[in-house]
Image: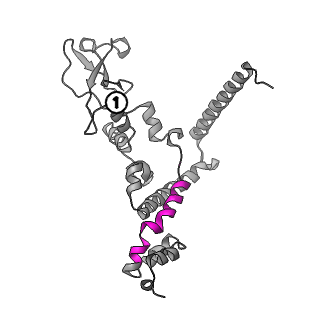
């Protein structure tokens, strides 16, 4: 039977029973096969199932970049004009010396005359750079826009690079995170499937290795014990609260 004698819908029904390697082989048979084998109708369910199977709540995953950004949003250093009357020096240490408020980006400064003092002995004042604020080469007109930008993977990598920490290889990053959900959704379904498949093939074996207690070192075990103690302490607080409220039967 020749595929050229079948309608597109008939070809799609046949191809829906094939796995990815077989689909690639069929696509090489003819131009018709190549067109149909790469259309969204063939790959939509595959991409949807794969994306649903491999996902997690990024905000609850300790160590992921959103968790890290909540501890340190990696806001840009002060790069405005010299601060005079009085003379001030921005701290620019990256340790809690920058924050966002409704007016703009705030930087913690100290009087320049106190440069020789220990940091803990200096007076401190907050200086605001009003919106629009520049970060990663783009201008952000409001608090909401800047806060949204700070949750972007590219912001994280660029600011980490500015601190000399480099960037992660693309294959180690969930493409939905790398591109943003909107840009990922706009990709053809086959491309969505292939990108997530590549990511899973790269990361899953590493997760399996790390999940095996035989591969844990002293630091891994100490971290597990720390998390266990935190979990137990949380449960004890819940139980104590329930007892205080009379739910102890």
> In the rendered structure, which segment of residues is drawn in magenta?
33-55
- Residue 71 % position (x, y): 45, 31
Report the residue at 49% width, 78% height from top: 10
Residue 121 versus residue 69: which sits nearer the camera?
69
Please tell me in which quadrant of the rendered image residue 148 appears.
top left
Q: Decide whether residue 54 is among the magenta residues.
A: yes
Report the residue at 21% width, 18% height from top: 83
Left or right of residue 176: residue 56: right
Q: Decide whether residue 86 is among the magenta residues.
A: no
Q: Residue furthest bottom?
A: 1
Report the residue at 46% width, 67% height from top: 41
Residue 78 versus residue 186: which sits nearer the camera?
186
- Residue 244 % position (x, y): 72, 18
Which residue position is annotated with label 1?
143
Quarter of the rendering occupied by the C terminus: top right
* Visible residue check, residue 204: yes
Left or right of residue 228: residue 247: right
Label 1: how many residues lie within 10 Å, few (<14), some (14-19) or many (20+)?
A: some
Above or below — where is 221 with respect to 19?
above
């Amino acid at each position: 039977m020749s595929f050229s004698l079948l309608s597109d819908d008939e070809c799609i029904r046949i191809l829906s029973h094939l796995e990815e390697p077989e689909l690639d082989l069929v696509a090489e048979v003819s131009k018709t096969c190549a067109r149909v084998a790469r259309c969204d109708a063939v790959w939509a369910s595959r991409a949807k199932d794969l994306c649903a199977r491999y996902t997690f709540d990024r905000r609850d995953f300790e160590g992921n970049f959103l968790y890290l950004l909540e501890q340190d949003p990696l806001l840009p250093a002060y790069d405005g004009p010299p601060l005079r009357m009085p003379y001030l020096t921005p701290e620019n240490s990256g340790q809690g010396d920058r924050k966002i408020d409704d007016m703009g980006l705030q930087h913690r400064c100290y009087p320049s005359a106190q440069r020789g003092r220990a940091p803990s002995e200096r007076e401190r004042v907050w200086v605001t750079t009003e919106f629009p604020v520049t970060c990663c080469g783009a201008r952000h007109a409001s608090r909401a826009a800047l806060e949204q930008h700070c949750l972007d993977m590219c912001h994280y990598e660029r600011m980490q690079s500015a601190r000399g920490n480099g960037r992660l290889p693309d294959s180690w990053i969930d493409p939905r995170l790398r591109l943003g959900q909107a840009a990922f959704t706009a990709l053809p379904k086959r491309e969505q499937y292939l990108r997530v498949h590549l990511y899973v093939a790269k990361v899953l074996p590493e997760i399996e290795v790390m999940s095996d207690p035989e591969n844990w070192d002293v630091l891994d075990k100490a971290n597990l014990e720390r998390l266990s103690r935190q979990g137990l302490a949380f449960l004890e607080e819940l139980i104590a609260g329930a007892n205080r409220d009379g739910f102890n039967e």
